[in-house]
């Protein structure tokens, strides 16, 4: 059977300042699709249970549905307060969050309650944390394992900011792949696979996005797959030259994964970061500069992955820093390929804005009482930038212009560098206590310029 041609979910540097894409909002629901009046929009509502809750997910789901029916609210992404007069909900629910309305709202469409069909997903975060494979003989671990949805990844999806609906498209592709599998679509007639490849420059959030995607899918598909695991394969440790037993480690790793996969209620995500290192290791082994053991290990790993990808309840997530074709058959056929580029102006503004909110929340930045209106989101900013009070450096609203200028000065910096910028700027301040937001922003701009000047050409 010939491989299907990849669907490139490309995000190749869309024009700076452009807002959103034109696709409609979509919610994924693994249950059979209800017959809806044509104009209703499915909106996901994620309900996180308290760690102490022992309530049944179905009961909570019905209670939240009833609560939403009673409220005549418009729908936009973000938390919905848990009603204090509902004892069952206050006892069991940690948070309720509306998701996926972004694309509608960005297109300036307001979603009113009667246009929406909420799809409620109830979940409880696992607090176990990463469980390392410790062989006990001093060797580095070959994988980390999480039970999803994990507390560690809570909020990660929301913290990653991209334009052009990249995250929504990834979610949809993965959801379609799972649905095709579940419905038993004949792969000889329609072919698809469940391999995701995110590629792009360093620090653009690829690894984080893979983990966040696994977390999201584990929440969205929990009625079909009540158990989900993420296994992060530590490819580097498998090829360490200190390893004489790498082959055995690969076998052990995959027999563990196979055990999980055999349980049909499990959804298993396998993350292989910097997948190009596999190709590099194989090449080095062939040229004789690496121990011959490593070629056997790479080949064993690739064979195992090839076998694994035919299992219906496995999604293989891979990342790479190189954008050129990767010389490994199994990613080469990845259906879900996405270029993850450096953040655009809008994304830079939103990343820095979220950093400032955090500094205000923790009291590191003071004198910024009404943070939300002083620092509006990018869509509202565009309308405000021409207002006379924004031009006047003495007014608090001037801050949003300053933040916009900082975001402009950060062109070329990765998401990772941007998230470090407030820290570096704070450390550069002469008086870091009771720091004035305007002074802080200008220091941040200077720091950004310095960081940029240190980038390799
Ligand atoms: N677009 C973005 N929006 C928000 N945060 C981002 C973005 N891109 C990167 N970051 C931040 O940068 C940090 C590093 O991201 P991550 O390690 O996932 O990047 P990466 O692409 O895997 O990097 P590398 O190629 O070096 O492995 C994350 O903690 C994330 O918070
Ligand atoms: Mg990475």
Image (tube, rainbow, N blue to C red):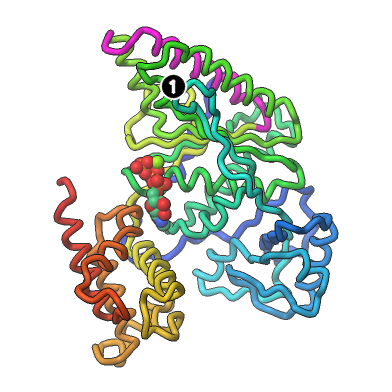
Q: In screen coordinates, is 335 left or right of 402?
A: right
Q: Quadrant of residue 345?
A: bottom left
- Of residue 409 and residue 260, the one placed in the foreground of this image is 260
- Of residue 255 and residue 28, the one placed in the foreground of this image is 255
Q: Can residue 339 be spotted in the picture? A: no
Q: Name the quadrant where ligand 2 sits.
A: top left
Residue marked by disc 1: 238
Quadrant, the N terminus: top right
Residue 309 highlighted magenta (yes or no): yes
Residue 417 highlighted magenta (yes or no): no
Q: Position of residue 146 (x, y in %)?
A: 59, 40
Chain part drawn in magenta: 288-313
Q: Position of residue 443 (x, y in %)?
A: 22, 71
Residue at image position (53%, 64%) is: 103
**Badge 1 residue CB within 8 Å of ligand 2:** no
Q: Quadrant of residue 389?
A: bottom left
- Mark 1 crowd level (few <14, some 14–19, many ≥20, 10 Å Cα): many
The image shows residue 342, relative to residue 244, as above or below, that is: below
């Amino acid at each position: 059977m010939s491989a299907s041609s990849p669907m490139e979910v490309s995000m190749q540097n869309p024009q700076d300042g452009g807002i959103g894409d034109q696709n409609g909002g979509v919610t994924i629901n693994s249950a059979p699709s209800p017959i809806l009046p044509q104009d209703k929009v499915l909106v996901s509502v994620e309900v996180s249970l308290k760690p102490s809750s022992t309530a049944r997910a179905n009961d909570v789901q019905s209670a939240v549905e009833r609560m939403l029916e009673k409220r005549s609210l418009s729908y936009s992404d973000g938390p919905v307060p848990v009603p204090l007069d509902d004892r069952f909900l206050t006892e069991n629910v940690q948070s309720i969050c509306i998701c996926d309305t972004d694309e509608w709202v960005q297109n300036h469409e307001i979603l009113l309650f009667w246009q929406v069909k909420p799809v409620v997903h109830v979940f409880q975060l696992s607090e176990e944390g990463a469980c390392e494979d410790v062989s006990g003989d001093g060797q580095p671990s070959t994988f980390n394992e999480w039970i999803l949805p994990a507390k560690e990844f809570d909020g990660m999806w929301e913290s990653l900011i991209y334009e052009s609906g990249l995250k929504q498209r990834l979610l949809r592709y993965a959801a379609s792949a799972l649905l095709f599998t579940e419905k038993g679509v004949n792969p000889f007639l329609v072919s698809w696979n469940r391999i995701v490849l995110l590629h792009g420059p360093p620090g653009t959030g690829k690894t984080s996005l893979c983990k966040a995607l696994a977390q999201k899918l584990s929440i969205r598909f929990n009625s079909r797959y009540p158990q989900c695991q993420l296994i992060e394969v530590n490819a580097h440790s498998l090829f360490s030259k200190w390893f004489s037993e790498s082959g055995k480690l690969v076998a052990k790793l995959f027999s563990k994964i196979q055990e999980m996969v055999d349980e049909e209620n499990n959804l298993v995500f396998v993350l292989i970061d910097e997948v190009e290192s596999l190709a590099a290791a194989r090449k080095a082994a062939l040229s004789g500069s690496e121990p011959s053991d490593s070629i056997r290990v790479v080949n064993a790993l690739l064979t195992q992955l090839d076998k694994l990808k035919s299992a219906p309840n496995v999604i293989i997530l891979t990342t790479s820093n190189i954008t050129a074709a990767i010389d490994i058959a199994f990613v080469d056929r990845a259906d879900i390929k996405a270029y993850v580029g450096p953040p655009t102006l809008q994304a830079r503004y939103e990343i820095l804005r979220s950093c400032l909110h955090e500094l205000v929340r923790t009291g590191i930045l003071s004198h910024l009482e009404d943070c939300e209106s002083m620092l509006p989101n990018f869509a509202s900013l565009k309308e405000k930038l021409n207002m006379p009070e924004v031009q006047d450096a003495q007014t608090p609203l001037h801050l949003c212009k300053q933040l916009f200028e900082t975001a402009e000065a950060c062109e070329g910096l990765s998401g990772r560098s941007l998230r470090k910028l407030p820290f570096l700027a704070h450390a550069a301040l002469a008086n870091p206590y009771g720091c004035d937001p305007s002074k802080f922003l200008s220091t941040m701009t200077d720091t950004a310029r310095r960081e940029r000047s240190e980038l390799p050409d």
